[in-house]
Amino acid sequence: MINIININGQLVTDSRDVAVMIDKKHSELFKTIRGYIEILEQSANLQSIDFFILATYLNRQNKEQPYYQLTKIGCDMISTKITGTKKKLFVVEYSTNFSEMQKTLNPACVEDILIQSLLEIKKARLQLAEDNNDIALL
């Protein structure tokens, strides 16, 4: 499963999860990503950090190990190397998960949540005022 997380407003997924999803060793995927980064760094118009963000994690031996956080367009690049059923499943999964996560960041959704919260507060105040026969709480 591809998990999408929000890091400072940037939606990303973990290269280790991607490697599992596409049935590839993480070390091989890591090497592929490094190759993409070398290509991207030759472009004046593109920045590799918009696709792949280097990060670290602690392994079972408590040693720091590198991995990449992939943006949606980073996943798009990875999907160009995959064929067959694996590609289809990977593309569907990351596209769906990125879209779902994006909806939670959509300002309209935030506005809806705030409106709902304000309505709940108003409802609670009305109930409290009724319970106490106190018009001042309204």
Image (cartoon, rainbow, N blue to C red):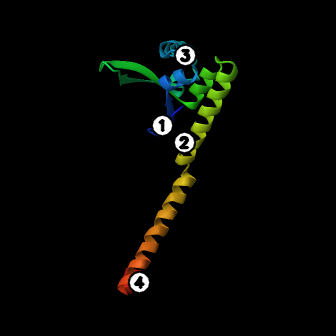
- Cα separation, mark 3 vs mark 4, equals 63 Å
Q: Which residue is mark 1?
A: 5
Disc 1 residue crowd, few under 14, some 14–19, many 20+, Cα 10 Å: some
Q: Verify CB contact (< 8 Å) between mark 3 and mark 4.
A: no
- Cα separation, mark 3 vs mark 1, equals 22 Å
Secondary structure beneath disc 4? helix
| Residue located at (46% from left, 68% from top) | 120
Residue type at tag 4: Glu
Q: Which mark is residue 35?
A: none
Q: If you read the primary sequence from the N terminus, does the residue marked by circle 3 or circle 1 appear first?
A: 1
Q: As displayed, is residue 16 above or below residue 4?
A: above
| Residue located at (58% from left, 26% from top) | 75
Disc 3 residue crowd, few under 14, some 14–19, many 20+, Cα 10 Å: few
Give x and y (percent) for residue 74.
Answer: 57, 25
Q: Which residue is mark 4?
A: 130
Quadrant for the C terminus, please. Answer: bottom left
Secondary structure beneath disc 3? loop
Q: Which residue is mark 3?
A: 24
Q: If you read the primary sequence from the N terminus, does the residue marked by circle 4 or circle 2 appear first?
A: 2
Give x and y (percent) for residue 68.
Answer: 47, 23
